[in-house]
Each structure stands twice: as structure tokens, then as C-alpha cells.
Amino acid sequence: GYVMAYASKEHAVELIGPECQTIDDAVEIINKNDFDIIASGVDTVDVPRFEKIVRGIKKDIITIVGGSHFLDEVDGPFDYAVIGEGEETFLELVNTIEQKRDVSSVRGISYKRNNEVVTTPKRERIMNLDNLPFPHRDRKATLRRKSNGAYLYPSSENQKALASITANRGCAY
């Protein structure tokens, strides 16, 4: 939502979640397209699912992860983790990668270099949230609620569409 909207100011972005029913669907869609980078904001419960997707995609696709699970450093099969608020950090990281510059100058990321984890200094928080665009919403996508509280794409035809709204920034705990 928010990071995607912010990045779309300068880059073509695509949401692939709505058509994915399984991890294999996501891997197939990613591998069939010509993506340079895939990224996801994840909570702790979503990390294993995104790890499986990353392990199944082509190795030349750069992977970026963020969200409340990644508080201080990258772990797992990901190339980069965005630490803290993602909008400015993600956009700067993508621009730096695209321009083939050294990512060590990007504040608020963690990555692996020569099998060592490198974490750059934290980025300042965004003080005026009114400067951020409204979150990206795929108008064709709808969600359905599972019994465990999770939301899945797409909803059944006889079910009303749902949308999530974030009421806080960062980890709620």
C-alpha cells in the first residue's frame, strides 16, 4: 500500500498478490515476468511464506523485504531488508540499485556483503505523514477473511470486499 504508492512516483510497480492462490502461483507469475526486483512488507507470520517464494524464483531477481519483523538486520534468503519506515528508504534503495551505486550510503537498510550482515545507520522518521501519498489499492482485488483472521485474495463472489487500513506505524508490540 503505502510503500508501493510512494515508489510509483518514480517507478513502474505491479501488485501480484490478487491472482496468487498459492506460493507456487506467486513463483510462477514472478518467474514468467521480467521483474528486476520483488519486494514485500511482511509481519513475522508472513516471513516463512515469502521465504518460500524467494527460494523458488530466478536467482537474478533482487529481493527486498520490510515490515515490522525486520527490526535491526536482514535474515533469511533476502538480498535487502528495509529497517523502520519504508517509503523513503525503499525508493532510495531501488534508485541506488538501478543506478548501480554502492548501497552502503542508503540509511535504514540491512544486507549481506561477503557473508557478513551490514546494517546502515537508521533513517529519521517521517514527521509529516501528510506528505505521503494515499496507499495503493488495486481496485479489482478483493479480500476474503479466513477463520484464522487472515485475509486472502480473491474473495468469493457472494462475499463483500474488505480492505485493511494501517492505524499505526511500525510494530504494534
Image (tube, rainbow, N blue to C red):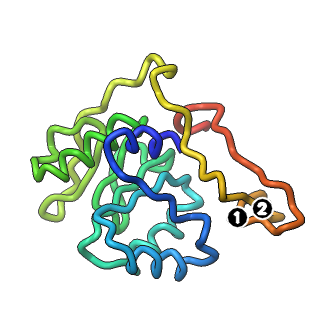
Q: Which amino acid is tagged 1?
A: Leu
- The local secondary structure at tag 1 comes to strand
Q: Position of residue 66 (x, y in %)?
A: 43, 49
Q: In the image, is residue 151 above or below residue 8?
A: below
The picture quadrant where one finds residue 23 is bottom right
The answer to whether marks 2 and 1 mark residues whose Cβ atoms lie closer than 8 Å is yes
Return the mark for residue 171: none
Q: Position of residue 90 (x, y in %)?
A: 34, 43
Say which residue appears at 51% left-offset and 20% top-offset.
Answer: 130
In this view, which residue lies farthest toward the right? Answer: 158
Q: Residues within 10 Å of mark 2 (few under 14, many from 20)?
A: some
- Quadrant in which residue 147 is drawn: bottom right
Q: Residue at x 46, y 17 (%)?
A: 128
Q: Which residue is mark 2?
A: 144
**Which quadrant holds the N terminus?**
top right
Residue assigned mark 1? 152
133 up-or-down from 96: above or below: above
Q: Is residue 54 left or right of residue 115?
A: right
Q: Is residue 87 left or right of residue 96?
A: right
Return the residue found at the far top.
128
Q: Nearer the viewer, residue 136 or 56?
A: 136
